[in-house]
Image (spheres, rainbow, N blue to C red):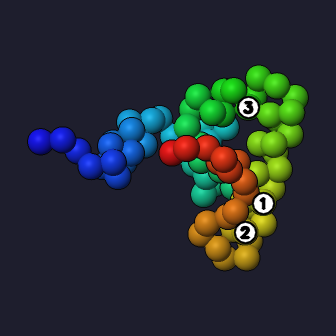
Amino acid sequence: MALKKSQRSLKKWTAQKWTTASGKKSSKTGEVYAPKKTIAKLKSTAAGKKKLAAANKKKREATKKGKQHAKHGLHKGKKR
């Protein structure tokens, strides 16, 4: 039996290794979660480091306001 498109997408998403840039829990550091490959790619360039820092700042601000999710734009334009 073939999987539906949404099921394939979920299977792919769960197979990725998601983490923070520091490798510590987001609840302790306030960092965003992203796939390990994405974080490595962002950390390899100056522009990527800036983007990651901005996303973490937005995440921390949203957390201070008591929000669980932050619109940080790190995944914007990505097909997931």
**Mark 2 vs 3, N-terminal side:** 3
The residue labelled by disc 2 is 62
Residue 80 at x, y = what percent?
A: 51, 45
The front one of 11 and 52 is 11
Q: CA distance from mark 1 to mark 2?
A: 6 Å
SS label for mark 3: helix
| Identity, as a three-letter code, of the amino acid under mark 3 | Leu
* Kind of residue at disc 2: Ala
The answer to which of marks 3 and 1 sits earlier in the sequence is: 3
**Does the image show residue 19?**
no
Kindly identify the residue that appears in the image at 73 percent across and 57 percent down: 72
Q: Which residue is mark 3?
A: 42
Q: Nearer the viewer, residue 22 or 73?
A: 73
Label 1 Cα crowd, 10 Å radius (few <14 / some 14-19 / many 20+): some
Q: Residues within 10 Å of mark 3 (few under 14, many from 20)?
A: some
Percent coordinates x, y for residue 19 in the rendering: 55, 40
Going by the image, does 3 lie left or right of 46?
Answer: left
Q: Which residue is mark 1?
A: 58
Say what secondary structure mark 2 lies in.
helix
User: Which residue is drawn at the image coordinates 86% and 40% (left, top)?
Assistant: 50
Looking at the image, which residue sits at the far left?
A: 1
C-alpha span from label 3 to label 1:
17 Å
Q: Measure the alpha-carbon separation of dots 2 and 3.
A: 22 Å
The nearer-to-camera label among 2 and 3 is: 3
Kindly identify the amino acid type of the residue bearing the numbered disc 1: Lys
Is residue 68 shown left or right of residue 47?
left
